[in-house]
């Protein structure tokens, strides 16, 4: 089936004739509902312009509520009024045209030139605004009409909708909308094109309204309050105002009221029509509801985030979705999502009953409301029947080919899973359903990085796909395993986190030996057919066990996170004999040397994952991630791993060293610097004042002190320490974190400087005025374990506050930044010829990225891993 | 006469070797430059001159001093050049193949090339891929991880430069002037190797006003402005007294400047009004004596190659161009509008890429350059740097609905009506709004059952 497409939407102004033609009813009564509770004829809630009450039928199309889309009505305005949105443009047109003959005040030749330019811009589908601006600018300069010789007068525009003509004697005369309309009518069609306007779709006089279209009631439905009272929509209120004034205007005019009164009423009518279009016009008091709340009229409905365009047209609410808290489950596959049974019973997939699935569907319906059952069936005639406790058996028997069954989702169904903010495409991925007890969505921890999720109360959304095409597309393009590689940097974004990294690190670190039973226990969730020969009979080594989950034939070498960058430091890389086990070498699927860490299997890095994805495909990569995580947790469960406050203990001599060698030394140096500064012996750095120099040097010294304290702590803690181990393997935390916990928190800063604010000359009353010392400006000497002194605690809070403010500001800023980027670039596409173009077919790039390479399809961030190919072909270490 | 290879020769030899197709040709060409047979140069010496070992061997080989390998340098050149690979990969491949040339055979060379080409083909983008969205997401997503209001030193104690999210936003906004303009000026010739000369240059370009080199006082007693120049500052900045006097005389017609015996300069006011005096005082103190307007500070730093270079606070690319000792071809600024103005739109495009990648990298964020390139290309595609947003790319789109959905909804609709515009519903937002499939990716094609 081919669906019809809307090819285009043309915009234009409605002519009074057009408004009358499309009107289903002329509205003359400001009342809505009559005594009997039925809509009043000729009223604003006219039965000919749509129905919103159940049971009533539309008098125009005969449709019931929900069927009838509504029809426009119209109000004949007693006198013309200016359309506020066009007030400025009308002013420009009045100034640019002759007050007598209506021609644009430009010579024929110039007109031709401008018209050609406008034509050119339109052809390019570009904005004509600049040319039109030029036309207006040139035209007002001519004081005498070159066609009829009339002297032009200066027109003043008084916001929002008043025009005043000033004649030669400086006398002012107000141009009433009738005058304005007459003048605009005189502008010939040929000249209108000079304003970038298309005379067929927009005559200038149509900007002065004589007839007002009344939107159908379906666009402004009234709501019935609990008390039974009707509450009308804001637009209806506004229309009521317009009709009332309109009526009064007519009555007064017919009665021959004085000009002053007529003008007042005219002004009032203008006010109501203006605020009907936009209730936030500068210079006009907004129309208010009885309660004092400003009314939401046309522009307010369309504009902004919750407006029609962004709120209801670009983004819509959907059915077949669920939302709940997420929690981890390492025992489900990475592309699965654990769905609570309660949710599974609400979400359905519509299945067409055919010859082949008739029996299965009957079985499903027969289960009724029990889990893999059905909620509704739809008969061949389209009638929808709810499956209930009473009728399910009958329905099951009755079920036939051509019916539709809305069955519960069950294991294996493809659903979309999403966490906001959806900043990149991997924020929405396709998962397979796994119905589980409990009330949370279960997620494998390895897919947290793409969603940027954690389990501290995060909620996620789930959407059930309703068509076969959608399911196919989701499965092929959006499946988790398809998106292991991030298009942002071409490396895995899915991979081990936290304990998975620690686990494998511990398993493959050093020469760990395991008995057969232990090995089997570790591998119990993993399909391994052959344990192979134990390396050190009867023991298998950790590296051997890890090798069991690697694909046979995998060859790979790289330097892990522990690498000390010997080559960069001018030393020789010891490779396999690296004392830190940083050189990872895999030969034929066998881990020869090195320890597995973040660089090997972590998310964002994951060299092994990357290679397996490329060489063996997405399924293999998925299996590897699953196996690796199972292996990691099985090992870490068996080995045990914990971190507590005692892990931050540093022996007495260590502490002494930190206090005395690192901290005191630095404080001493700082004192000396200050002394030198005060004695004006300090040499200023180029381009810095003396004071800045001092601050800089002090900051440097204190930063060094903290680093030194950290180094000392590291020495005493050793790699066996849980925190050090996590930091070094890349599982979680950094050495800085540990330093702050165990040794010294260090300098607190605000905007990259030491803390200075507070009292005059000092930060807190605890210090002497003018004290430039470390303590007085936010140096925290203690560690978190020791506990901070009151002043230290205060400074830490000051620094922390800055960080908090920073994140709060950043989220809103980067959100808008992202929206702008997306809006500017969303239409760009690679065409079949390899060029990148936008909707007008303007070429943005002749070749995408200069080499046509998809960043997510290269090899570990590069297009081709040449080293690997050469190595493979000649077995030599190529290049660096 | 025998002669050893000089540094210039080295370059020549290398260039020729790369260009040559076959070995005989290389020999011929080199012969033209200097007679190979007469060269008495050994491998060690060549290596000492920091010639890559592979080249060194080739040079010796041309001289007939070494056995030929099976795969010649020319083979690698020819074959790599003939392949359909992008230049970047060709370069890398060439370099890496040369390094292992002695282990190659012709067959293996072919196989390696075939494999690289295969992998390249596999890595190409799929037609109809929505690369714009991917690029926008790839830059936007890390935006949340970037720091805000980070000012950073380029080296210790040097120049503040806006970095992080504010900088990225500044770039895509196509601002006329960045919040912290700065230049990196490379130096030429001995300026690059001599620190003192480089320091002299900083004095040459740093803007120096009278107030920087002396005290300016307005005296109501004799209704004139007195300037007492500081000898030390003058010396440091290499400014002569006459120069200052000259500059002051240029202040305007009727300004009387005279030097008094105690070294002071006296400038008299024409009309003896008090406010006139104050205005003159202000005018005098902000008279530019030396340097380039806009360059507040310049600092000498040593770059990675050991060359001296200048970092400046403030930017004036056009003016810096004419200063002697500056290698303009390697001098950059972070003011993209200025680059577009002085060097053209292609340079501006490169500057956008450089600046963005630099900022992202500094924040430790990994983003493929192709995404940044697409953004830069979109911003510069019609010859001027357009911002990403209402007054640029998003505002200049063909679709009415798309513009209305972005910002200033009603104005766009009203305007579209007067122009009688037609929305052709080709883009993403428009089709979402009317509720039909978008025309990108899988939406661009249809499957019809036969």
Image (tube, grey):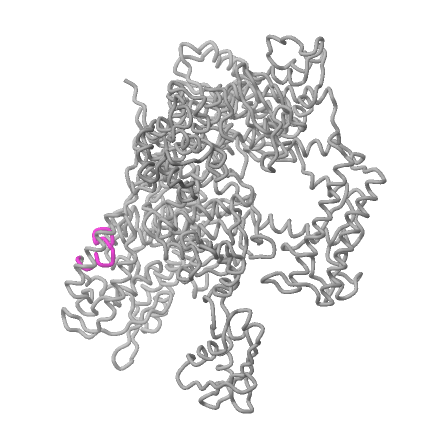
Nearer to us in this view, A483 or A786? A786
Q: Give the position of the C terminus of chain B as an image quadrant.
A: top left
Residue A439 locus on image (x, y percent) = 63, 27
Q: Is residue A435 above or below residue B271?
A: above
Q: Residue at x 38, y 36 (%)?
A: B38
Q: Is residue B372 above or below residue A749?
A: above
- Residue ranking furthest to the right: A652
Q: Give the position of the N terminus of chain B as an image quadrant.
A: top left
Q: Say whether residue A233 is magenta.
A: no
Q: Is residue B51 above or below residue A140?
A: above
Q: Say whether residue A193 is magenta.
A: yes
Numbered range of the magenta stretch: A190-202
Residue B233 locus on image (x, y percent) = 56, 72
- Number of numbered markers: 0
Nearer to us in this view, B102 or A592? B102
Residue A674 locus on image (x, y percent) = 74, 62
Nearer to us in this view, A685 or A204? A685
Q: Is residue A57 visible?
A: no
Residue A70 falls left or right of residue B145? left
Residue A71 locus on image (x, y percent) = 33, 44
Q: Is residue A196 visible?
A: yes
Residue A295 falls left or right of residue A741? left
């Amino acid at each position: 089936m081919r669906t019809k497409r809307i090819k285009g939407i043309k915009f234009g102004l409605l002519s009074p004739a057009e408004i009358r033609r499309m009107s289903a009813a002329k509205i003359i009564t400001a009342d809505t509902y009559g005594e009997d509770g039925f809509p009043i004829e000729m009223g604003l809630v006219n039965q000919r312009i749509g129905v919103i009450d159940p049971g009533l039928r539309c008098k125009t199309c005969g449709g019931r509520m929900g069927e009838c889309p509504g029809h426009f009505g119209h109000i004949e305005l007693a006198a013309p009024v200016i359309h506020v949105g066009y007030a400025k443009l009308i002013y420009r047109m009045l100034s640019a045209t002759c007050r007598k003959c209506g021609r644009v005040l430009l010579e024929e030749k110039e007109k031709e030139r401008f018209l050609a330019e406008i034509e050119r811009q339109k052809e390019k589908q570009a904005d004509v605004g600049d040319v039109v601006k030029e036309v207006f600018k040139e035209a007002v300069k001519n004081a005498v009409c070159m066609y009829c010789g009339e002297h032009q007068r200066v027109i003043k525009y008084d916001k929002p909708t008043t025009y005043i003509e000033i004649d030669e004697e400086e006398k002012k005369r107000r141009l009433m909308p009738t005058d304005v309309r007459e003048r605009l009518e005189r502008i010939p069609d040929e000249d209108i094109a000079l304003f970038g306007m298309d005379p067929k779709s927009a005559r200038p006089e149509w900007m002065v309204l004589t007839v007002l279209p009344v939107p159908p009631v379906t666009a402004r439905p009234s709501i019935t309050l609990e008390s039974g009272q009707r509450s009308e929509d804001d637009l209806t209120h506004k229309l009521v105002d317009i009709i009332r004034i309109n009526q009064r205007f007519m009555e007064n005019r017919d009665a021959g009221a004085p000009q002053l009164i007529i003008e007042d009423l005219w002004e009032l009518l203008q006010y109501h029509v203006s605020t009907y279009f936009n209730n936030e016009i500068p210079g006009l008091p907004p129309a208010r509801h009885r309660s004092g709340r400003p009314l939401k009229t046309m522009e307010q409905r369309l504009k902004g985030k919750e407006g029609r365009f962004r709120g209801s047209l670009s983004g819509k609410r959907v059915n077949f979705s669920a939302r709940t808290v997420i929690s981890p489950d390492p025992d489900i596959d990475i592309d699965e999502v654990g769905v609570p049974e309660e949710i599974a019973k609400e979400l359905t997939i519509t299945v067409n009953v055919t010859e082949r699935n008739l029996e299965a569907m009957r079985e499903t319906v027969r289960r009724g409301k029990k889990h893999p059952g059905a909620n509704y069936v739809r008969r061949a005639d389209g009638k929808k029947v709810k499956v209930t406790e009473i009728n399910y058996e009958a329905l099951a028997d009755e079920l036939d080919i051509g019916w539709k069954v809305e069955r519960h989702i069950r294991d294996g169904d493809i659903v979309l899973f999403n966490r906001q903010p959806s900043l990149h495409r991997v924020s929405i991925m396709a998962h397979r359903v796994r119905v589980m007890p409990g009330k949370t969505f279960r997620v494998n921890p390895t897919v947290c990085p793409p969603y940027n999720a954690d389990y501290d109360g995060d909620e996620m959304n789930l959407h059930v796909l309703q068509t076969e095409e959608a399911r196919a597309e989701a499965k092929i393009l959006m499946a988790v395993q398809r998106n292991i590689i991030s298009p942002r940097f071409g490396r895995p974004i899915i991979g081990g986190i936290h304990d998975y990294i620690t686990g494998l690190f511990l398993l493959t670190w050093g020469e760990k030996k395991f008995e057969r039973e232990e090995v089997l226990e570790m591998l119990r969730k993993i399909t391994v057919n052959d344990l192979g020969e134990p390396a050190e009979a009867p023991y298998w080594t950790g590296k051997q066990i890890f090798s069991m989950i690697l694909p046979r034939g995998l060859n790979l070498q790289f330097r892990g996170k522990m690498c000390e960058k010997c080559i960069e430091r001018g030393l020789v890389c010891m490779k396999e004999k690296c004392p830190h086990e940083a050189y990872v070498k895999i030969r034929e699927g066998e881990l020869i040397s090195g320890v597995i860490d973040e660089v090997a299997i972590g998310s964002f890095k994951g060299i092994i994952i990357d290679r397996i994805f490329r060489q063996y495909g997405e399924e293999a990569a998925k299996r590897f991630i699953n196996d690796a995580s199972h292996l990691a947790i099985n090992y870490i469960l068996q080995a045990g791993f914990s971190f507590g406050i005692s892990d931050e203990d540093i022996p007495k001599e260590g502490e002494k060293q930190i206090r005395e060698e690192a901290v005191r030394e630095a404080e001493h140096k700082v004192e000396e610097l200050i002394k030198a500064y005060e004695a004006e012996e300090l040499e200023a750095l180029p381009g810095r004042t003396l004071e800045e120099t001092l601050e800089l040097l002090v900051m440097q010294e204190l930063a060094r002190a903290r680093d030194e304290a950290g180094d000392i702590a590291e020495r005493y803690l050793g790699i066996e320490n849980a925190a050090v181990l996590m930091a070094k393997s890349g599982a979680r935390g950094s050495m800085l974190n540990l330093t702050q916990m165990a040794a010294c928190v260090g300098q607190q800063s605000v905007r990259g400087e030491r803390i200075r604010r507070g009292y005059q000359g000092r930060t807190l009353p605890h210090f002497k005025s003018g004290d430039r010392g470390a303590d007085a400006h936010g140096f925290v000497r203690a560690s978190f374990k020791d506990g901070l002194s009151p002043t230290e605690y205060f400074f830490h809070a000051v620094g922390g506050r800055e960080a908090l403010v920073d994140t709060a500001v950043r989220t809103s800023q980067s959100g808008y930044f992202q929206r702008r980027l997306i809006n500017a670039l969303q239409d760009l596409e690679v065409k079949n010829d390899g060029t990148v173009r936008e909707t007008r077919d303007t070429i943005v790039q002749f070749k995408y990225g200069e080499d046509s390479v998809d960043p997510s399809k290269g090899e570990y961030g590069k297009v081709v891993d040449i080293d690997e190919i050469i190595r493979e072909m000649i077995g030599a270490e190529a290049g660096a | 006469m025998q002669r050893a290879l000089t540094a210039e020769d080295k370059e020549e030899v290398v260039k020729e070797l790369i260009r040559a197709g076959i070995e005989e040709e290389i020999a011929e060409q080199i012969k033209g430059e200097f007679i190979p047979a007469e060269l008495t140069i050994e491998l060690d010496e060549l290596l000492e001159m920091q010639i890559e070992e592979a080249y060194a061997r080739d040079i010796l080989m041309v001289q007939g001093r070494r056995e030929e390998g099976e795969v010649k340098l020319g083979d690698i050149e020819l074959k790599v050049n003939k392949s359909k690979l992008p230049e970047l990969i060709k370069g890398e491949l060439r370099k890496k193949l040369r390094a292992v040339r002695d282990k190659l055979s012709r067959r293996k060379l072919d196989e390696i090339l075939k494999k690289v080409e295969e992998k390249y083909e596999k890595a190409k983008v799929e037609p109809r891929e929505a690369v714009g969205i991917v690029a926008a997401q790839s830059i936007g997503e890390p935006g949340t991880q970037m720091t805000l209001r980070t000012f950073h030193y380029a080296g210790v104690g040097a120049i503040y430069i806006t970095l992080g999210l504010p900088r990225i936003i500044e770039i895509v906004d196509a601002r006329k002037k960045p919040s912290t303009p700065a230049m990196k000026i490379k130096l030429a010739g001995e300026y690059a190797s001599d620190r003192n000369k480089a320091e002299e240059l900083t004095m040459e370009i740093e803007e120096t006003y009278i107030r920087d080199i002396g005290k300016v006082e307005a005296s109501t007693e004799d209704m004139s402005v007195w300037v007492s120049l500081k000898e030390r500052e003058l010396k440091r900045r290499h400014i002569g007294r006459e120069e200052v006097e000259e500059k002051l005389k240029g202040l305007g017609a009727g300004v009387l400047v005279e030097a008094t015996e105690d070294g002071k300069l006296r400038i008299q006011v024409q009309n003896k009004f008090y406010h006139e005096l104050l205005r003159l005082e202000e005018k005098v103190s902000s008279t530019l004596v030396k340097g380039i307007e806009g360059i507040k500070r310049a600092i000498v730093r040593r770059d990675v190659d050991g060359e001296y270079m200048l970092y400046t606070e403030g930017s004036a690319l056009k003016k810096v161009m004419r200063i002697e000792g500056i290698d303009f071809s390697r001098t950059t600024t972070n003011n993209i509008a200025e680059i577009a103005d002085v060097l053209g739109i292609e340079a501006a495009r490169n500057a956008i890429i450089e600046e963005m990648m630099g900022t992202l990298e500094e924040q430790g964020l990994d983003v493929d350059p192709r995404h940044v390139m697409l953004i830069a290309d979109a911003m510069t595609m019609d010859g001027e740097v357009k911002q990403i947003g209402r007054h640029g790319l998003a505002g200049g789109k063909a679709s009415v609905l798309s513009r209305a959905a972005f910002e200033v909804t009603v104005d766009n609709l009203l305007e579209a009506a007067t122009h009688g515009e037609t929305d052709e519903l080709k883009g993403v937002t428009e089709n979402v709004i009317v509720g039909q499939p978008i025309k990108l990716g899988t939406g661009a094609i249809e499957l019809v059952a036969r």
